[in-house]
Image: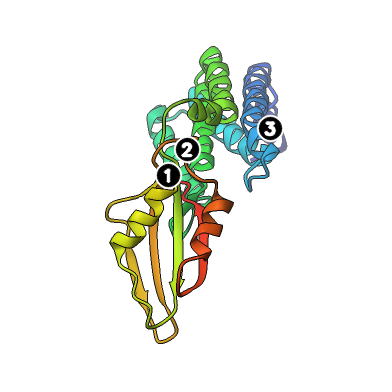
Amino acid sequence: MDIGNLARHLAAYWSMNELATNAVVFMNLLGALLLGALVGYERAYHGRAAGMRTYGLVCMASAGLTVVAGYPEMWFGGQHALAATPAPTRIMQGIVTGIGFLGAGVIVKEGLNISGLTTAASIWAASCIGVLIGIGFYAAAILLAGLSAGTMMWGSQVENWLPAHPALSVSLRIAPGVDIRLDELTALFAKVGYQVAPGSFSIAASEHHTEFKFVVLVAVRGLAAPMDELACTLRTQRGLLGLTLAHARN
């Protein structure tokens, strides 16, 4: 390729059509970054691992991958004819698959407690916002960003207003030689306003102690004993070597 052809080839990347297309892509990326950061602010405010940067990058990358599929005639400076126009739906499928791995990385399971599900779901929503921006549904993207942020900020308050049965995970370590029946534990928790979740019992025995693990549900919200009072009540039981109480979030 001589100097003249090389210059024309490079100039094609800076033609008015190419610059106009790049401007559209840039505005899409900027809008996706801002909307993704808006959704991520709630996570950052509450100290989650994924914050504004993560959400902004996910949303912006999703928008970038989608918007370029809309301008195949401008690829490579508009100098290469494509055999077929790429299907945006295939790109969306790849985005959803990739975001699934990222979302799985923020889900943590510790015993009966599962955390990170809301963060994972909201990262997936951020990628959807980016896709909407990429295909030009700007109003829908803004609405989805607002709904996502609002759900994460005020959804827990709505849950607190509605009837529910919050759960606690319980672990009791009993001294060897002390026999405690499951029906005794069920009756004990019933006295302080909790009911044992059916099928949640697990028992592990060793030469040092017997450990009971199970989940209890608040029978009537507002009438059940707070966690600290419940701990004081359990400490009075015979043969108790130790206990662990935790919110069974999922």
Give the SS element for disc 3. Answer: helix
From where the camera sits, is residue 75 visible? no
Q: Is residue 84 above or below residue 135?
A: below
**Nearer mark to the viewer, of 3 and 2:** 2
Secondary structure category for the residue under label 1: loop
Q: Position of residue 10 (x, y in %)?
A: 68, 32
The residue at the point 63 percent across, 19 percent down is 24
Secondary structure of the residue carrying numbered label 2: loop
Q: What's the residue type where badge 1 is placed?
A: Gly
Q: Which residue is mark 3?
A: 10
Q: Residue at x 56, y 58 (%)?
A: 232
Would residue 161 appear left or right of 57 to someone viewing this image?
A: left
| Quadrant of the image containing the N terminus | top right
Q: How is the image coloured?
A: rainbow
In depth, the one of 87 and 78 nearer the eye is 87
Residue that mark 2 sits on = 223
Return the mark for residue 133.
none
Mark positioned earlier in the residue sequence (3 or 1): 3
In primary-sequence order, the first of circles 3 and 2 is: 3
Q: Which amino acid, mark 2?
A: Leu
Nearest to the observer: residue 19 or residue 102? 102
State the CA–CA distance, disc 2 to disc 1: 6 Å
Lower position in the chain sequence, tag 2 or tag 1: 1
| Front residue of 125 and 245 | 245
Residue 32 in view in this figure: yes
Residue nearer the viewer, 2 or 93: 93
Question: Where does the image place residue 18, in percent across and percent down from the top left?
Answer: 64, 22
* Residue underneath mark 1: 193
